Image (tube, rainbow, N blue to C red):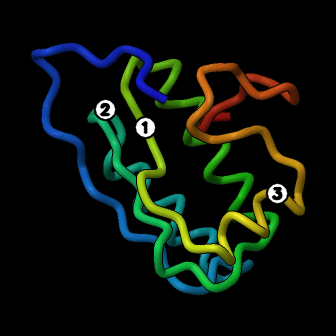
Amino acid sequence: MSIGAEAGDLPAAKLLLEPVLDLGAAERLHARLMDLRGQPLDIDASQVERLGGLCLQVLMSARNTWQGDGKSAVISQASAAFDDAWAMFAAPGFNSDQPPAFGTEGLDA
């Protein structure tokens, strides 16, 4: 997703996701994302071994928030396990310019 990217934007902040994104990781992920809000975001999911539903929701909420803020957010690298889990949940693609079908609420909701 590159919505709102402009030449004057800050360089993208890097976020390396934890290998296990389960219930216990959701609060930490949310806090890390809130710390990075307001700047372009490059998410590295290359080390993810397990993606749970709550962390997927946090990531989708972040996508909506970044889009609403006019900032870019992309998952630039993803492990096969991350891609497989994302597909299993039948979630809309994170890097798609299409808004998710299930709502527009973001991290503040």
**Seen in the image, is 12 located left or right of residue 94?**
left
Badge number at residue 36: none
Q: Which residue is mark 1?
A: 73
Q: Which is closer to the viewer, label 3 or label 2?
A: 3
Q: Nearer the viewer, residue 49 or 10?
A: 49
Nearer to us of marks 3 and 1 is 3
In front: label 1 or label 2: 1
Q: Is residue 78 above or below residue 103?
A: below
Residue annotated with mark 2: 38
Disc 2 marks a residue whose amino acid type is Gly
User: Helix or strand or loop: what does disc 3 sit on?
Assistant: helix
Coordinates of residue 79 in the picture (x, y in percent): 56, 73
- In front here: 28 or 9? 9
Q: Is residue 20 above or below residue 107?
A: below
- Residue at image location 69% in from the left, 40% down from the top: 93
Residue type pointed to by label 3? Ala
Q: How far from the left and from the top, in percent, is residue 89?
A: 88, 57
Residue at image location 22% in from the left, 14% down from the top: 6
N-terminal of the pair, mark 3 or mark 2, is: 2
Q: Residues within 10 Å of mark 2 (few under 14, many from 20)?
A: some
Secondary structure of the residue carrying numbered label 1: strand
What whole-number distance in Å separates the C-alpha atoms at marks 3 and 1? 19 Å
Residue matched to label 3: 87
Q: Horizontal and vertical percent for residue 67?
A: 51, 23
